[in-house]
Image: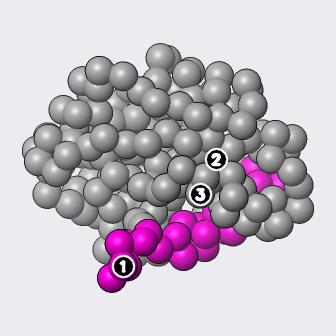
C-alpha cells in the first residue's frame, strides 16, 4: 500500500520504518529539515533500538523516503497516518493545535491525491476528538465530507520508548475505529498485507 506518515517524531519514525519493512511504500512528511534529512540519508532521527538499520534498509529498498511537501507526498496515498504530537497543557489537557494544522494540510491535499485516502489519527487524544474536532477540520479543508472523498479512522499507538520497534512488531492486538467500512478495511489491509 502507499502510505503517508505525517510527523517523523517518535511514533512516525517507528511506524514509517516498520511499515516499509513489511513491504509498503512509505513517504514520511515533516516540517523539520533535520528529520526529513535523516530519513533521506537512511539515518534515524531518534534513538531507538533496531530503528537505524530498518530506516537504512527502507531507503536502500526504495520503500521509504521523506519530504517536507505534503501535497507531493499525498499523490496516490491510500493511508495517511497523522503522527503529530499532542503536548499536555499545565492543566493536563491535550493541545490538538499541531494535529489540527496537519489535518488542514492533509485535507487540502486530498483532492490532488487521485485516490480515496483513509486519514488515520495515530496521535494521543481524548475520546471524541477525532469526530468532534479533527474530522470537521479535514472536511473544511478538503471541501468534502468524510466517508466520501476520504475516510477517517483512529488507530491508537502503544509504543514504549526503548522497545517501540518490538512493540510495533509484536503487538498483541491492534485497535481500529473507523467512520466507514472502507476505511476499516484499508487499515486491516495495512496490517495484514
Q: Which residue is disc 1 drawn over? A: 91
User: What are the residue bounds of the magenta stretch?
Assistant: 87-115
- Residue in the foreground of this view, choosing between 101 and 65: 101
Would you name the residue on which mark 2 appears? 119
* Front residue (pair 193, 173): 173
Which of pointers 2 and 3 indicates the residue nearer the eye? 3
Marks 3 and 1, the one that precedes in the sequence: 1
Report whether 45 appears left or right of 163.
Answer: right
**192 and 99: which one is in front?**
99
Residue linked to disc 3: 129
What's the distance in space between the residues labelled 1 and 2, CA to CA?
29 Å
Specify whether 94 is left or right of 59: right
- Residue 81 vertical placement versus 125 (above, below): above
Name which of mark 1 and mark 2 comes first in the sequence.
1
Residue at left offset 80%, top offset 47%: 146
- Secondary element under disc 2, as helix, strand or loop, is strand
Amino acid at each position: 500500500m502507499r502510505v503517508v506518515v505525517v510527523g517523523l517524531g517518535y511514533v512516525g519514525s517507528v511506524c514509517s520504518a516498520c511499515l516499509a519493512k513489511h513491504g509498503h511504500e512509505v513517504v514520511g512528511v515533516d516540517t523539520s529539515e533535520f528529520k526529513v534529512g535523516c530519513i533521506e540519508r537512511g539515518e534515524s532521527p531518534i534513538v531507538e533500538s533496531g530503528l537505524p538499520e530498518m530506516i537504512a534498509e527502507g531507503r536502500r529498498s526504495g520503500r521509504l523516503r521523506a519530504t517536507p511537501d505534503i501535497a507531493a507526498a499525498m499523490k496516490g496515498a491510500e493511508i495517511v497516518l497523522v503522527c503529530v504530537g499532542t503536548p499536555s497543557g499545565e492543566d493536563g489537557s491535550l493541545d490538538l493545535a499541531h494535529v489540527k494544522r496537519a489535518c488542514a494540510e492533509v485535507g487540502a491535499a486530498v483532492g490532488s491525491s487521485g485516490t480515496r485516502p483513509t486519514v488515520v489519527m495515530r496521535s494521543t487524544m481524548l475520546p471524541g476528538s477525532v469526530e468532534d474536532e479533527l474530522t470537521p477540520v479535514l472536511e473544511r479543508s478538503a471541501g468534502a465530507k468524510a466517508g466520501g472523498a476520504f475516510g477517517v479512522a483512529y488507530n491508537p499507538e502503544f509504543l514504549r520508548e526503548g522497545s517501540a520497534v518490538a512493540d510495533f512488531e509484536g503487538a498483541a492486538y491492534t485497535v481500529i475505529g473507523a467512520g466507514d467500512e472502507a476505511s476499516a478495511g484499508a487499515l486491516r489491509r495495512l496490517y495484514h498485507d
